[in-house]
Amino acid sequence: MKDLAVGLAMGLGAIGPGIGIGLLVAQGLAAIGRNPEATSKIQTNMILGMAFAEAVAIYALVVALILKFV
């Protein structure tokens, strides 16, 4: 039962950030395509958003590891 909880925690914890990062990059590239002069501002915000989304996946990993070893 514990292994199922670990799998669900990591699996569900990775789906959201994966979808979020995909949407973020797609919209960022579309915005750069429409307005190439704003590339540096868009790219900076896009990378920052990707880091925040990835942090959620790292939190899910920490929760999965805590469930596994406690």
Image: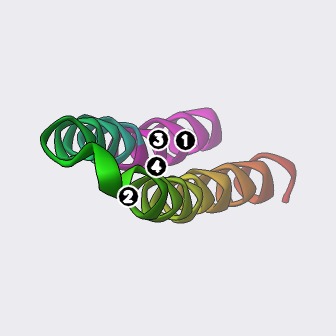
Q: Main secondary structure of the magenta part?
A: helix
Q: Is residue 45 above or below residue 12?
A: below
Taking 58 as reference, is 23 left or right?
left
Instruction: Report the residue that reaches farthest toward the right.
Output: 69
Identify the residue shown where x is 40% and y is 50%.
Answer: 39
* Element carrying mark 1: helix
- Mark 2 closeness class: few <14, some 14–19, many ≥20 residues within 10 Å: some
Image marks 3 and 1: residues in contact by CB distance under 8 Å: yes
Image marks 3 and 4: residues in contact by CB distance under 8 Å: yes
The nearer-to-camera label among 2 and 4 is 2
- Mark 4 closeness class: few <14, some 14–19, many ≥20 residues within 10 Å: some
**Dot 2 or dot 3, earlier in sequence:** 3
Image marks 4 and 1: residues in contact by CB distance under 8 Å: yes
**Which residue position holds label 2?**
42
**Which residue position holds label 4?**
13
> Toward the viewer: 20 or 1?
20
Identify the residue shown where x is 19% and y is 47%.
Answer: 31
Q: Which residues are magenta?
A: 1-17
Q: Is residue 9 magenta?
A: yes
